Amino acid sequence: MSTTKQDTGRSYHLQCTGEALITANKHNKPSDITLFGSCFCPFVQRVWIALEYLDEVDPYKKPAELIEVSPKGLVPALKLNTFTPPRGLNESTVILEYLEDLASSTTKRTLLPPISDPYARALVRLQVDHVNRALVPAFYRYLQAQEEEKQIQGAKEFVDVIEGLVKLFERYEAETDCPTGLWREGGELGLADVMAAPWLFRATNVLIHYRGFSLPEGSHFRAYMEKLVNYPAIKATCSTEGLYLDSYERYAYNRPNTSQVANAINAGKALP
């Protein structure tokens, strides 16, 4: 249930803080790829974890340059400056697939098992599908719920979808030998980790503060969360707690027209 007394009217932040600000400043110069984002947006963070390059914008004031690469004006969006004229991509899942393909011919790093093991890759995609279809909308339904009964229901649903993700991690561990994913002992960062990390991280601050949420028990899950939030590429894209508490107050009190995501949850529609 809610642990705060009233909506104080705090607004979202326009600039990242802490480790995220240090990382953004390191990359604050022209590059082949520009990422348009917002400092609190989890959809942006999942791309930033992979890219670590940010051109910060106010997501509710759409600059013309953003509209050029993202027709809906939604972040994240990429501007690809190697093309003449520059080209653009939008949608976080599409951007991550593009970065994966790009890395295959450049850095050779990957968030997926090797292409020689299509079954392992398919299991990771099942994890990713669960994150997008279940975990992400459950997070917003829980946070935006106003009645105590719906908050209790939202907490149970969110725990259930986390446990569903854990089962998919355990299946992957049991059925493959590929060291992809932080769930496996000694595993490397995987695509499902990147897809889920922004919301799991916000469960440790936003949901605890506004809903008194308790993460699922279990030593393996707690160890996974410890590795996840402290993984260098993830930690480098996280701001200080105050930024998230301020920026998500709008969701916690379900203010009208908070965002297109919030509106979709309220209407019972698919996320934009």
Image (tube, rainbow, N blue to C red):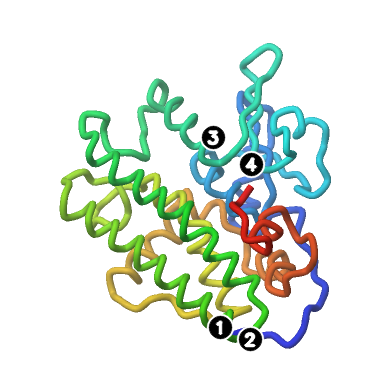
Q: Which residue is mark 2?
A: 3
Q: CA distance from mark 2 to mark 3?
A: 36 Å
Q: Amino acid at mark 1?
A: Gly
Q: Which residue is mark 4?
A: 76
What is the residue that sits farthest to the top in this orientation?
84
**Residue 125 position by quadrant:** top left
x, y percent for residue 20? 61, 53
Which dot marks residue 95? 3
**Residue 120 position by quadrant:** top left
Which dot marks residue 194? none
Q: CA distance from mark 2 to mark 1?
A: 6 Å
x, y percent for residue 157? 46, 72
| Residue 110 drawn above or below residue 232 | above
Pointers 4 and 2 in contact (C-beta within 8 Å): no
Residue 138 appears left or right of 268: left
| Residue 45 drawn above or below residue 29 | below
Q: Amino acid at mark 2?
A: Thr
State which tag comes first along the sequence, 2 or 3. Answer: 2
Residue 185 appears left or right of 225: left
